[in-house]
Amino acid sequence: MRSRAVALIPARAGSVRVPGKNVAPLRGHPLMAYSIAAARASGRFDAVVCSTDSEAFAEIARRYGAGVVLRPASMAGATSPDIEWVRHALDGTSYDVFSILRPTSPFRTAATIERAFELFGERCDSVRAVRRVREHPGKMWVRDGDYMRPLLPQPEGEVPTHSRQTAALPEVWVQDSSLEIAWTRIVADGEIAGRRVVPFFSEGLEGLSIDYPDDLERAERLVAADPSLLPEL
């Protein structure tokens, strides 16, 4: 039997760094529209659903072809964990698979989603988009009163990680916000990733996320030069 899958588009209204970023305009359409379009064009989903706390955002999602689940404000704060709204969106449904496609990644296309699904299966709990870090955590510090200490525990009797060449440190990958695919069964355990996580390596602009005002400015420059970078609406 074919697994039933749902694309979840999270779009809370209270973004701090870029106010209203989930519906910020890019080439005449709200960011949200491109994630909805990519999900629908991929052909991988039985439904595309926007989870939002905003009636205005909900209307935009419907206009571009998504269903809507209105979440309570308690699940839409700056520190609200994803598991809360995911569980809320899936409650009462019978989907086997869910994918989180955040509006802030407008360059993720249907082809991106297809590649990710090729990695997904029973052997894993989830697939998550990642990219190699540019600033290695082995060279990071945290404040400790008037001083600093390394972020990572340091090996006894060895050269500290912050004093090594980056090439001598282990490869580290950081998740980007473009794509996650997981079995709905793991949500019951309070997880959205599970334990067996397969990496999906973003290519080119797929993992570019609109998190700061200059990210949006960059996206605008990119699509002005080449509109075909975005999913078709």
Image: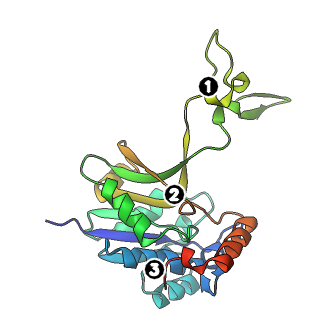
Of callouts 3 and 2, which one flags the residue occurring earlier in the amino acid sequence?
Answer: 3
Q: Marks 2 and 1, how far apart in space?
A: 25 Å
Q: Position of residue 65 (x, y in %)?
A: 42, 86
Disc number for residue 168 = 1
Q: Marks 1 and 3, how far apart in space?
A: 42 Å
Q: Position of residue 9 (x, y in %)?
A: 47, 72
Which residue type does callout 3 highlight? Ala
Q: Position of residue 172 (x, y in %)?
A: 55, 38
Q: Secondary structure at mark 1?
A: helix
* Rendering quarter of residue 147: top right
Disc number for residue 37 = 3
Of callouts 2 and 1, which one flags the residue occurring earlier in the amino acid sequence?
Answer: 1
Name the residue at 36% across, 65% down.
114
Viewer-proximal residue, 227 or 98? Answer: 227
Tag in front: 3 or 2:
2
Dot 2: within a 10 Å radius of its alpha carbon, few (fewer than 14), some, or many (20 or more) residues? Answer: few
Viewer-proximal residue, 96 or 201? Answer: 201
Name the residue at 24% across, 50% down.
122
